[in-house]
Amino acid sequence: MTEVNLDAIYRPSEDIVAREIEGELIIVPLVSGIGDLEDELYTLNETAKAIWDRLDGATSLRAVVAALAEEYDAPPEEIARDVCGLVGELLRRRMVVEASGI
Amino acid sequence: MNQEPTTMNQEPRTPNYAVKRKLGEHVLWRERGPLLSRLDMELTERCNNNCIHCCINLPTNDARAKARELSTAQWQDILRQAAALGALSVRFTGGEPLLREDFADLYLYARRLGLKVLLFTNARLITPEMADLLARVPPLERIEVSVYGMRRESYEAVTRVPGSYAEFRRGIERLWERKVPFIVKGALLPPNKGEMEEFEAWAATIPWMEVPPPYAMFYELRGRRDSAAKNRLIASLRLSPEEGLAVLTRRPEAYLKSKYEFCTKFMRAPGELLLSCGAGYGGSSCVDAYGLLQPCMALRDPRLAYDLKKGSLREALQEHFPRLRELRASNPDYLNRCARCFLHGLCEQCPGKSWSEHGTLDTPVEYLCQIAHAQARYLGLLAEGERAWEVEDGRERVNKMVKGVEV
């Protein structure tokens, strides 16, 4: 289980490179242990991409949820589920790290 | 918002937000490929080996070649352009790419741009530091190591460099110890011809070898057309078409399966257009050591190259190469034979081979023609004595062959 804290701030890990190609967000491992990637790609779906763009190392997840809820006119609890789901998954994959407190 | 929990424990969810997919299944490749998918980069034409069969190597200390090579900053600029155009990977080759003193810098630069790196090397310069780097920042492609013999005597009879065998073995060991994925490729030559079984048995113990190693044996002449003496030597080392066929068909089922698939997809008479092979498209272009972008690695006619020191990759791909794809053959011999020949594809005749053999783009290469005919006879596509370019029902023969297998 991966703990996601809505009051925490997250940012992309320095162990990966995120690239946008033809509108697709692709995550490429930089160091060993993230994924071998031979013949494979990690990509983010549209929901995930909208969240990823806000994981800037300066904004708390709670603020990210609020901004997305306003932008997409969606219930915050629904957005929070997606945000925590994605960040939890990215933490497990070592693609994001907690930035707050550093 | 206040009712939201402060922390949430997350189990793995489906559907995943981050999806891991096979490259070929990805929408980028199925529906809209980027302008550039891969770029070959010949970092240097210099090599620390002096292989008897090599079509490109210059001496390690060739000062003139070294002075002409692109600088670190120029290579970095090309890497940035490649990434911006959507390339997912680059191939670092040569010569021996590890001879570049800035190799580690270029490698890291490429990886930090999110590019995968396919490295072609003889492994002699895989120092502990280099192996550590490749382990810490993996290339994300299996390194391809050329092997010239299983013993010092055979290996160095090919490379003509004393001490090269021990360095190659040490390089391999360093990759292996650190679990850096690599595969090996052979080059069949008189000094090592008797070592195939030993080579393949050893290759089978390498964890990343999924299939038996491929061999080079139908050697290309020097693409720079820089030495008639070297070309005579290379030509003398080539396997005859019959010898080559015997090697290719040692595992008949695997050979037939691959050829049936290949023939169905790629064999057809090319007509007058010279670059009917994919050269000049976004996955085949190659920057030489001096910044000239070629439509493919084999095609070194300087008249077709685009100078990246004076223009951009985008311009080359969008404006220069499309013009090249309109080039048509004019040699009557080519038009009467190759342009009409249904073995095109199985046959490796192409402007690049024509250039290295004859200095033209459209002269039939007899050696390649003989190899293709030998294979076609083996596959049942031609009878003894038939000439493929005179066959009227080539496509039907291919279809019949494939259907026969499917039944």
Image (cartoon, coloured by chain):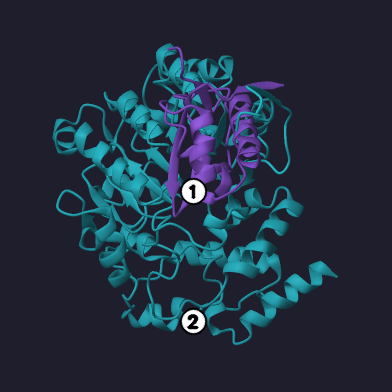
Chain colours: A purple, B cyan
Mark 1: amino acid: Glu
Secondary structure under the numbered disc 2 in the rendered image: helix
Q: How many marks on residues?
A: 2
Question: Of residues B327 and B379, which is closer to you in this image?
Answer: B327
Q: From the viewer's perspective, is the residue at label 1 or at label 2 nearer?
A: 1
**Position above or below: A35 against A76:** above
Direction bottom: furthest residue: B392
Secondary structure under the numbered disc 1 in the rendered image: helix
Q: Chain of mark 1?
A: A
Direction right: furthest residue: B407
User: In the image, residue B96 lies at what x, y percent?
Assistant: 35, 32
Residue at 65 percent across and 34 percent down: it is A85
Please give left or right for residue B155 compared with residue B245 in the image.
left
Residue at 63 percent across and 54 percent down: it is B25
Q: Quadrant of residue B301?
A: bottom left
Mark 2: amino acid: Arg
Question: Of residues A20 and A36, which is closer to you in this image?
Answer: A20
Which residue is disc 1 drawn over?
A71
User: In the image, residue B75 lies at what x, y percent?
Assistant: 25, 38
**Position above or below: A25 against B240:** above
Which residue is disc 2 drawn over?
B340
